[in-house]
Amino acid sequence: MTKLILRALAGETLPTPPIWMMRQAGRYLPEYRATRAQAGDFLSLCYNSELAAEVTLQPIRRFGFDAAILFADILLLPQALGADLWFETGEGPRLSTITTIEGVRALKPKDAIHETLGPIYETVRILARELPPETTLIGFAGAPWTVATYMIAGRGTKDQGPAHALKAADRATFAALIDIITEATIDYLSAQVDAGAEVVKLFDSWAGSLTGQDFTDFAIKPAARIISALKARHPGLPVIAFPREAGAGYIGFAKATGADCVAVDNSVSPEWAAEHVQISGPVQGNLAPHHMVSGGQELIDATRRVVDAFKGGPHIFNLGHGITPDANPDNVALMIDTLRRG
Ligand code: CP3
């Protein structure tokens, strides 16, 4: 096994950590903006397999990242389950809302998702053919809680209020929605693996707003169910879990869910994450994305600090969250140079 990302995920401590970056195909790249304009809009880009593969490859060509992440979105699954989905320019996603058991029951059966998601699997097949042999192909989905927050509110929310409200008012309906997303996510990720994804990542962007029993029931348990089902179907498949802003919830998360690697955000220090999370297995992270905007000596120092903190164990270098549209591509090159040349 020569791919560096796969070696790190298998628990190997490498002299230089392999690197990729969340949202590495995105608006900070002029070539991405050009291809998106060619596609028309963001969703048309996601469903155009040739162009989605092209934007996935752009940051690999430009920077030589060790992994490519499939270009798609976590909200395509709700769309495939029957939710309306559109993106308001400059604002973000909008969906039809689900707040009742009737709304949950009106979702399509999970077998129907592949009809909508076929082009995504085709993107994966193109990438499996076209990626350089040393580059690992990562597939992904949103974790059920994060996906549910968008399906319930119909949009992104600061505090996930509507999802918490439904959970408090009608836990059975809320749990039924989580179950449907969980089962559909297993089939969606499994189809990505059949098409050629070598690793999958579960994005639980809003895990940090779950506490106590809710964290167990709606962050840990669905992830554990998804991971065990995937590993039963695809023995040896490495899985990365990202319970963003989980804080103390990061401790023991890999063991509780069966994830091979935990991605940590930058609300925790790399030293803390090394001591409390990396102690039980590979970690990914966690440079603050703002360094990709500001650059300079601070970026160099912060990159070295992350490398240094995690050098005693298996580590994949990444940002603590997605790179932002105002980032400067030169700073990405500087981060990679700092990492690879010391
Ligand atoms: O990382 C990658 O390069 C792979 C592709 C990817 C996208 N979204 C493309 C995208 C991945 C892995 C995602 C995950 C995703 N999508 C998450 C979880 C990770 C996270 O960031 O917390 C979430 C919550 C979403 C939902 C979503 N998609 C939102 C809230 C938005 C709007 C906010 C924004 O950044 O504009 C999107 C749009 C989106 N997804 C863009 C991209 C490149 C920007 C769309 C554009 O080109 O206009």
Image (spheres, rainbow, N blue to C red):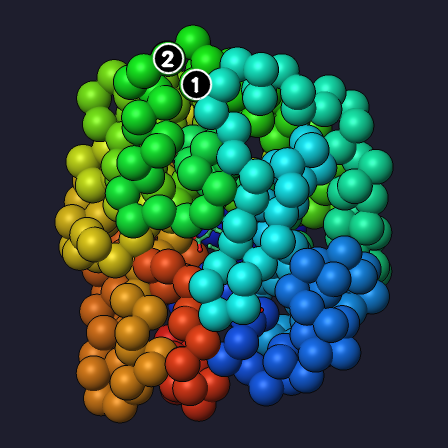
Residue 171's disc number: 2
The front one of 277 and 32 is 32
Q: How crowded is mark 2: few (under 14 residues within 10 Å), some or many (20 or more)?
A: few
The front one of 182 and 162 is 162
Please tell me whether residue 42 is drawn above or below residue 201 in the rendered image.
below
For numbered disc 1, what is the local secondary structure?
helix
The answer to the question of whether label 1 and label 2 lie on touching residues, with beta carbons closer than 8 A, is: yes
Residue pictured at 18% horizontal, 36% vertical? 248
Amino acid type for the residue under numbered disc 2: Arg
Q: Is residue 322 visible?
A: yes
Residue pictured at 37% horizontal, 13% vertical? 170
Residue 212's disc number: none
The front one of 244 and 107 is 107
Residue pictured at 62% horizontal, 80% vertical? 33
Quadrant assignment, res 182: top right
- Quadrant for the C terminus, please: bottom left
Residue 148 in the image, given as x and y percentages of width and height: 47, 32
